[in-house]
Image: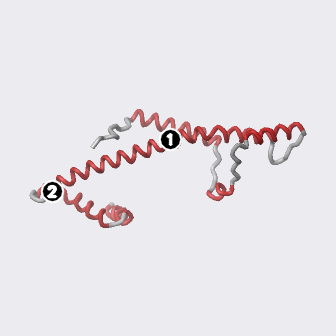
Amino acid sequence: MEDKADQTIDDAKLVQLEDALNQMEQIFRTIGTPLQTQERLEALKPRKGCEHFVSLTMNIARENGIRLPSYSANQIEVDQKLRNQLPAIIHRLDSLHQLASDTLLTAGSEYWNGFLSYYRVLNAMAQSDPNLAVRMKPVVDFMAKSSRHSNKEVAEDDKEEA
């Protein structure tokens, strides 16, 4: 089996990643707007292709001296610009998230597959070696329990053992 996730993140790179994420988080906290689920559902979404018409309308409003107390033309243009800037950033974040998630899945799959290979060999050897059987008993018990019970039951059992 090819080992695709064949590296770890050394401490220096881990610190770099954390620093970069912290910087991004700080920037997004200054421009970001957290919403509740209901607010996301109720938020108006701009029509596709509306950018030109929004700009045209704001220009016509300025030319005619129209000012609405709850919406300034300048703020609408600031919001429109932010709305136009964010998709490219979100796309990159989504791509990075997918890469990190794929790497997590691959590393987990590879180490679990490797473990299962060793487990099968050692478990077979333990059938004829009582000392090895004693040493393998906790692993065998874990494997027997996790294959018969739901993940929730296994997690509850783990809590009780701790």
How many labels sit on residues?
2
In the drawing, what numbered circle is on residue 95? 1
Left or right placement of residue 28 versus residue 46 in this view:
left
Secondary structure of the residue carrying tag 1 is helix
**Extreme residue in the front direction:** 49
Q: How crowded is mark 2: few (under 14 residues within 10 Å), some or many (20 or more)?
A: few
| Residue that appears at 41% across and 33% down | 12
Nearer to the camera, 157 or 122: 122
- Please state, as top left, top right, bottom left or bottom right, where the C terminus lies in the image: bottom left
Please provide percent x and percent y for residue 52. 75, 39
Q: Seen in the image, is 95 located left or right of residue 120?
A: right
Q: What residue type is labelled 2?
A: Ala
Secondary structure state at the residue bearing disc 2: helix
Q: Distance between the residues labelled 2 and 1?
A: 43 Å
Looking at the picture, how far across and down is residue 159, in whole percent? Answer: 36, 62
The amino acid beneath tag 1 is Ser
Place of residue 110 in the rendered image (x, y in percent of width and height, measured from the top left): 31, 46
Task: Between residue 20 and residue 112, name the one nearer to us.
Answer: 112
**Mark 1 neighbour density, 10 Å: few (under 14) some (14–19) many (20 or more):** few
Residue 75 visible in the shown view: no
Q: In which quarter of the image is residue 76?
A: top right
Query: Which label lies toward us, 2 or 1?
Result: 1
Name of the residue lying farthest toward the left: 128
Q: How is the rendered protein coloured?
A: secondary structure
Say above or below: 145 vs 40. Answer: below
Q: Quadrant of the N terminus?
A: top left
- Quarter of the view holding residue 15: top left
Q: Residue 124 carries which label?
A: 2
Mark found first going from the N terminus, 2 or 1: 1
